[in-house]
Image (cartoon, rainbow, N blue to C red):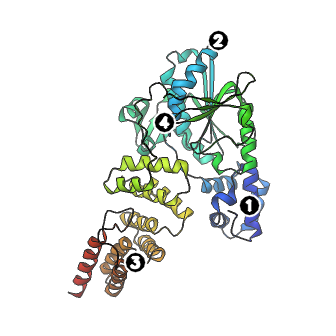
Amino acid sequence: MPILTNNPYIQQASALIETRTGLAASAQFNANLEAILMDLAQGHLPRLVQTLHDTPETAPAWQKLLHALAIGETYFFRYQPYFQLLKNYILPNLIPQRRRQSPPRLNLWSAGCATGEEPYSLAITLHEYLPDMARWVVQVIGTDVNLTALQAAQRAVYRRWAFRHTSTEFQARYFDSTPAGLQLKPALRRLVSFRQGNLLSTPPPLPFDVIFCCNVLIYFEASAVKQVESMFYDALAPGGWLLLGQAETLRFQRDRWTTHIFPDVVAYQKPLEPGITARRHTGPLPSTAAIEAPAAPPTYADAVRALRVKDYDVADRILSAILEQTPTFAAAHVLLGSIFANRQAIPEAHLHLDMALRLDPLQADAHYLRGLLHLEAGRLDSARESLRAALYCQRGHTLAAMILGHLYTEVGEIARARRTWEEALRALDGCPPEKHISDVSDLTTSAAVAFLSSQLKQLKG
């Protein structure tokens, strides 16, 4: 969808973003791009656009913009079938070939590595697979255009929620506890190097055995995807492997790759010699029998049901899988915001709520949850503003009305409290008694009506 603006400076900035980084700015960010640019420009949009035109992507103006455009998040061993494929199929096929070198070498590249969880996951996988790693020359390289993310990657300190699909035993084995979070042990940090890099420019100067580029190209426009796919092919050593995101596939010159189709994963290999074929692997990978695939992919409704019974781990996994397929699903970000808020992971909660509102500014539940977070932090004015925004987006939003009416009574604004609760009651009129009033709550219509009626009765008393 094109940007809904006739502002020539916004259009120029969009074209610059697409040319320099490959990001399909107009399609991915739509009208949000204008708000982001106006915020960064601070009233001087022509000057900002000129600065973007005149400076490289490493310049401060570009870095602020790229940080604002950053999408999604990452965590250790995200989409585990990829790492099972690496450990149980790719490495067993690569290692005998590479052992013939003196010294034996392995080069892996995490392209679009964000804050480093993916390249560090690769390093841990190699550490577990290669008992004689001391004999090897191993390089794991992570690149990203976002300098702020790379600085966090180099620190290698992570909050608990970066380990959402790992065990406490894993965390204790590979990480040290620090006041700021869990830090990867030095020996593993030394396996990984980070470089600021744009996928449309020159790749790191190595022939790579494995390239991970997951959920990056889905944000690129077509000509940039074509350029990057060609660059990946050239950067791989013969026999090397490319793994793309779960929702991604090669889009250009597919006939020069060997496509490997596994039950849970599609992977692409640069062939050792001419003669390209697609290979379908029908059996499960070794050591993957314990992974039980559901008969049908879990749905958003399944995540809501898990959230209502406080099974946050199940809801989290479902939502992560959904966002792998549809990163712009705003309601999924709202549910993740609710989960993280319940876990007291406040920065992560805000991250998902902010993303939801960037994607859909009328997400009433996101405004409501923001209001609760502000309230818990003691920011009463911000809380009232967010709760009013929820009521603006959804007339009589029950949860927001409950809290906002209470805030009004605390400061003696009895008439406003009464109007707020009466409006919420009217909005519930005709709703089935057992219907849940929101995806982020287990409260039913009948319980909400009883609560609001009780509050109004107390006001009259």
Give x and y (percent) for residue 79: 50, 39
Near mark 3 (Cα within 10 A), the count class, few <14, some 14-19 or many ≥20, is: many
Q: As shown in the figure, which amino acid type bears the numbered disc 3?
A: Gly
SS label for mark 2: loop
Distance from the alpha carbon under mark 3 to that under mark 1? 39 Å
**Picture coordinates of residue 33, whole percent (x, y):** 65, 63
Give the residue at mark 4: 80
Mark 2 or mark 4, earlier in chain: 4
Q: CA distance from mark 2 to mark 4?
A: 30 Å
Q: Which mark is residue 396?
A: 3
Instruction: Return the disc, 4 or 1, that comes first in the chain's sequence.
Output: 1
Closer to the chain start, of discs 3 and 2, is 2
The Cα atoms of the two marked residues, 4 and 1, are separated by 37 Å
Mark 2 neighbour class, 10 Å CA radius: few under 14, some 14 to 19, many 20 or more: few
User: How many labels, in total?
Assistant: 4
Q: Are marks 3 and 4 in contact (CB under 8 Å)?
A: no
In the rendering, which numbered label is found on residue 339?
Answer: none
Check disc 4: other Cα within 10 Å, few if <14, some if 14-19, many if 20+. Answer: few
Dot 2 amino acid type? Arg
Q: Residue under circle 1?
A: 13
Which mark, residue 100?
A: 2
Give the secondary structure at mark 3: loop
Q: Image point 62% across, 42% down: which residue?
A: 112
Mark sitting earlier along the chain (3/4): 4
Viewer-nearest residue: 257 or 229: 257
Q: Residue at x 75, y 66 (%)?
A: 9
How far, Cα to Cα, is label 3 from label 4? Answer: 42 Å
Relative to 332, does residue 124 appear above or below in the rendering? Answer: above
Left of 448 or right of it: where is 162?
right
Q: Earlier in the sequence, mark 3 or mark 1?
A: 1
Which residue is farthest left?
461
Q: CA distance from mark 2 to mark 1?
A: 50 Å
